[in-house]
Amino acid sequence: MYKFYFLISLCFSSHLWATQYQSPNDFVNEAFSGTPPAPQSLWVTPALKESVANILQHKSGFMRTRYWQADNKTVWILKEIGKTQLITVGIIIQDNKIQSIKVLDFKESRGWEVKHSFFTDQFKSITMNPDLSLSQRIDGISGATLSVHALTKTAKLALFFNQHINQ
Amino acid sequence: MTHFSREFSKLLYKGHRHIGFAISLILILLSLTGIALNHTSELQLDQRFIKSPFILDWYGITRSKSPKSYAIQSHWLSQLEDTLYLDHKAILETKEPLIGAISSANFIVAALPNTLLLLTPEGELIESVSKANIEKIAQQKNVIFIQSQQQVYSSHDQLLSWQKAEYLPKAWSLQSPLPPMMTKELKQRSRERILDYERLILDIHSGRFFGTWGVYLMDVSAILLIFLAITGVWFWLRHSIKRMNKRNR
């Protein structure tokens, strides 16, 4: 019987904490002041796969990602697992620097502190070094280590993809 | 030393030896399962599943539910519990129910109420596209249609962009019964994806694997271990004191 309760509590726990703060469409609309360009797609080709796996520290679970580009601005919607659930993150890059990063959807039961601006503001104006590291150190949040890692990885990935499409 | 305390010491020593021997197997079991549980991630215990029919029967894990399936060209896309299968192959885990599927020579699209999964013909995920309140999906030539909140949208570029549909598709993707042989195999495969090694080892560690009496046995073993630790320290102290006294004489 306890197994039944365990499974039920697991099912409910993930739904209880699942929160969408903003829909990806609304994020993109806001980024382009209501007139977003048509989405484009970037294929994770075998040449990109290794770098993507290095950044994510695991094999990428997708083969294509979409982005929106106008002038020197690109917007990315990326997903990465925190501990067991996907965190959806919206990233705006202006002139190869992160303009803003926002948690759009958070399903983990812990680590939601990463949605706050005191944490996400650290990413502002960050660029990517040639060794695929970020130009500035990101301070962690105790108790939210995996979510911090997930956000840092999506930021790196967005900068890497941005660099790739602008080459 | 009085006669009583000598007899008591003898009894304790005898008890220490016998109890130590009796619970040695349980102690080894606890240690081994404890070490394994300490390295769950490295050993991927939560990602490896028990396939033994005996253990699955012991847990009462059966499969009576039938998969939900959609015929896509010469293949089947099915969902049983939280797993999506392309024919017999488990391809993805999702908590959302499968509500339709379409395919072309280059890709497959699985529709869930809030997500469209774009897959390769081999079932590898190309992209997971968020889309709210999807009710059904269809395909006509190279155009993909979805119905969301009574409105039909079409995509001409493999799910990249959506427009309000100018015409309606002739047929929507409908659920079809999976052939009995495939149903049987999927049920068996699904049964083998429920109990992971971490759960089993945790249950052995706590004694729950052996039912209520197993838990009591582990409780008694824990109390006896405390007894062993206390008597062990006591014997050691007594022995040290005796040795010191002898040296001082």
Image (cartoon, coloured by chain):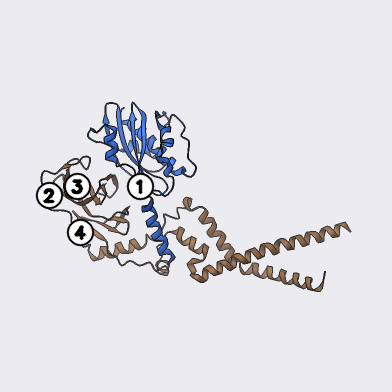
Chain colours: A blue, B brown
Is disc 4 on the same chain as disc 2? yes
Q: Badge 3, how many Cα within 10 Å: few under 14, some, many 20+? A: few
Residue placed under numbered mark 4 in the picture: B175
Q: Is residue B49 above or below residue A61?
A: below
Q: Secondary structure at mark 2?
A: loop
Residue placed under numbered mark 2 in the picture: B169
> Which residue is pictured at 78% across the width and 70% down the height?
B5
Where's residue A9, x and y in %?
40, 58
C-alpha span from label 3 to label 1: 37 Å
Where's residue A105, x and y in %?
34, 44
Q: Amino acid at mark 4?
A: Gln
Q: Amino acid at mark 2?
A: Pro
Mark 2 or mark 4: whose residue is earlier in sequence: 2
Q: Are marks 3 and 1 in contact (CB under 8 Å)?
A: no
C-alpha span from label 3 to label 2: 19 Å
> Which residue is pictured at 62% across the width and 70% down the height?
B22
Decide which of A20, B99 is in the foreground and name it.
Answer: A20
C-alpha span from label 2 to label 4: 17 Å
Q: Return the chain for callout 3.
A: B
User: Relative to B213, is B98 on the left or the right?
Assistant: left
Q: Return the chain for callout 1.
A: A
Q: Quadrant of the C terminus of chain A?
A: top left
